[in-house]
Amino acid sequence: MKAIEGGITSPLGWKATGVRSGIKKDKLDLAVLYSETPARTALAYTQNKARAAPIEVMMRDDPQTLRAFVINSGNANALTGPKGMEDAESMRTLTAQLLNIKPVEVGVASTGVIGRYLPMDMVTKGITEAVKQLERGSEANISAAKAIMTTDTKMKTVACQITLSDGTLATIGGIAKGSGMISPAMKALHATTLSFVTTDARLDKPIGAKWQAVMDSSFNVINVDGDQSTNDISAFMANGAAGGMPADDQPEFWEAVMWVAKWLAKAVVIDGEGATKLIEVHVTGAKDDNEARAAARSIVASNLVKAAIFGADPNFGRILAALGNSGSEFDISKVRLRLSNGKTVALFGNGIPLITPGSAEEQVASAILHEKRMVVELDLGIGNGAGEAWGCDLSYEYVKINASYTT
Amino acid sequence: MKAIEGGITSPLGWKATGVRSGIKKDKLDLAVLYSETPARTALAYTQNKARAAPIEVMMRDDPQTLRAFVINSGNANALTGPKGMEDAESMRTLTAQLLNIKPVEVGVASTGVIGRYLPMDMVTKGITEAVKQLERGSEANISAAKAIMTTDTKMKTVACQITLSDGTLATIGGIAKGSGMISPAMKALHATTLSFVTTDARLDKPIGAKWQAVMDSSFNVINVDGDQSTNDISAFMANGAAGGMPADDQPEFWEAVMWVAKWLAKAVVIDGEGATKLIEVHVTGAKDDNEARAAARSIVASNLVKAAIFGADPNFGRILAALGNSGSEFDISKVRLRLSNGKTVALFGNGIPLITPGSAEEQVASAILHEKRMVVELDLGIGNGAGEAWGCDLSYEYVKINASYTT
């Protein structure tokens, strides 16, 4: 697996673009992705029961094959009733007409403010323009990545290549957006944020379960603020343009897909609203992998842990308090808690605190907490389950961004 | 039921005091409560599996009768291993010796920083002094209420009286502490924060179920930050010193107890870390009361809702997104969402937004959101279940307090 400069159009047969339709005042806000041939598709959706109109449309049809995706930012088309459904359908129909494909071959997604109608005159103009501008290459990768952003401060775009066992070179590209309203859920067919991963690999078998496994170890273990969005959707689309053998049973291929998804998910966390630090929680010694992941997620979801890390306060008791709230089993007399980043410091073990106020160990902990990324290593002491979660700290800036989102 | 000036020693036969033991630099940090006669007791404990030593001690014995309670602030005696257990036992034993009662008749609770050993020399000195100073009256009420505070900015103390059907005047008093690490749980025997309610009423029957019902409509529906503490305990103690008939089957008596508990729980929310506003969520039309409460709790627990209300941003979509994450059933085409505070404004109904940007209605919503308290009224449109939850907004100050708690 080799990371390459590139993005969503790096795989063969894919085009994309992002345009400014006017939904946002002066930023790119509408993207179209397009495959020259039908692409085998897996979609994962939010578990939030207050679903946006485009999510309703996609869940109803749940297409296994797509040729295109139309995505707008700046307006979520959520909680918009029958008119919202019509608008989502119109986005699909118009994109299909312009591309001379069927509406059911077009995916639709929206992200932005909830509870407002889409300005369909602008959307129509934007789609028309976007379809004209579809292309391959770095401009397409960048404009598409930017057009799906909301409060994101950085675009998230990545690509890699893998050589299959018959020598076929397969390329995988991805874009994602997401900054706030980000919290993982574990159920099947769940995604957080918007993310789109394309490949030119040939896949002959159903890919839903494999994509879900990728989700569960990437987008489903990140947390910015505990709020699951009304609009989350995650798409994986394989058009086979690379030719050669099917990649279905090539573990290296799926590892490469996982690498892309993890890269995008971590990029979302690092760019979390107001985030100043990336917190990785690695849990081992759990009853099983699910309990390990639940413990890790509870820790990265704790406001108190997040605020303490923002302030570089080595208040490790909050980490164990969050563990205690996770529902996961542990043996407190065997729990081991360490903090690492190059250096490692043991915080808790044998049922007792291993650092004291003012000690040299506390100073090491404090130094690690001042870094931009750190790993919380937690062994629950009862089994072989392991799992991870990634989150960011809670800063003044998070509050500021979300105190005035629509005003 | 009549509210009176008073507190924890207003009921007959109760004494209390708060002293400065030295755990905190220059504040009261140790309280003792004492009843001249044995008091029938109900205790509710945190559901966090990482339990503090005093919680372990109390859950192990789960006494049905108590004569005294010793409580320290500034140090949670949590995650402190065998020495922590010894220290909690010592607090009980010393208090019992000095009061000439049995250790099992003494309750023990701690609150403060997690993961540090108690300075037992100071604790011993403090208990010795506190027992000497036990008294009734406003000084006792105030010093006890202050000695259990952590990041609280205001003491929480309340009292009321109720005349039973035989003419007996029963008094109920309460104190509570709590500001951060506050999130409700619904299971039996769960409490959030520390709270102590005393009465001189005579109670002859088991009171655990009644106290749990009070908890579930008061302390268990509040939320500051979604983090459940390692140290939560809530005690209700009735010593019968008022004489007269038993109050077990007097609904007015239990209504008065509920009033005290709700008063204290709301006081905790209003004094939540960094809180500037009280948010009451009233849910109706749910499948049942549990689902109504779950929906209400999901809304007051949402960081995005809390930050929007801090900024007086009428971003009502976040309220419905939080509903969607609650797991509770609703019919979006029948959901009605209103915001009120004297004035009322409809935000969502018939499946569509009822306010638009810049409209007169949005201005009313914005005006309400600038108030210090507001009610979110949400009807789920499918049944007769009703429930409430109360929370506070998420402010810069919350982050500031928790970014430097131990440093």
Image (tube, coloured by chain):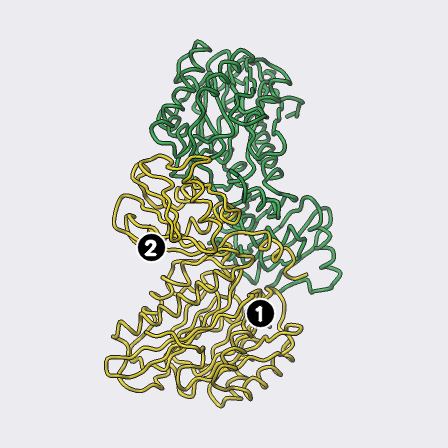
Chain colours: A green, B yellow
Q: Dividing the picture into quarters, in which one does residue B83 lie?
A: bottom right
The percent position of residue A15, horizontal first and vertical second, equals 55, 15
Residue reaching furthest to the top: A100
B101 or A111: nearer the viewer: A111
Q: Residues within 10 Å of mark 1 (few under 14, many from 20)?
A: many
| Quadrant in which the N terminus of chain A is drawn | top right
Horizontal side of B46 relative to A308 (left or right) equals left
Q: Which mark is residue B77?
A: 1
The percent position of residue A306, horizontal first and vertical second, equals 59, 50
B279 or B15: nearer the viewer: B279
Q: Residue B356 carries which label?
A: none
A203 or B154: nearer the viewer: B154
Do residues under tags 1 and 2 come within 8 Å of each other at their CB atoms?
A: no
* Same chain? Circles 1 and 2: yes
Q: Name the residue under label 2.
A: B387
Work out how far the residue at label 1 is from the one at label 2, CA to CA, in angstroms: 35 Å
Residue type of the residue flagged with mark 1? Asn
The percent position of residue B378, horizontal first and vertical second, equals 35, 47
Residue reaching furthest to the right: A360
Horizontal side of A44 relative to A390 (left or right) equals left
Q: In this view, does A142 lie above or below B265?
A: above
Q: Earlier in the sequence, mark 1 or mark 2?
A: 1
| Residue at 52 percent of width and 18 percent of height | A33
A172 or A206: nearer the viewer: A172
Q: Is residue B149 above or below residue A375?
A: below
| Residue at 36 percent of width and 44 percent of height | B337
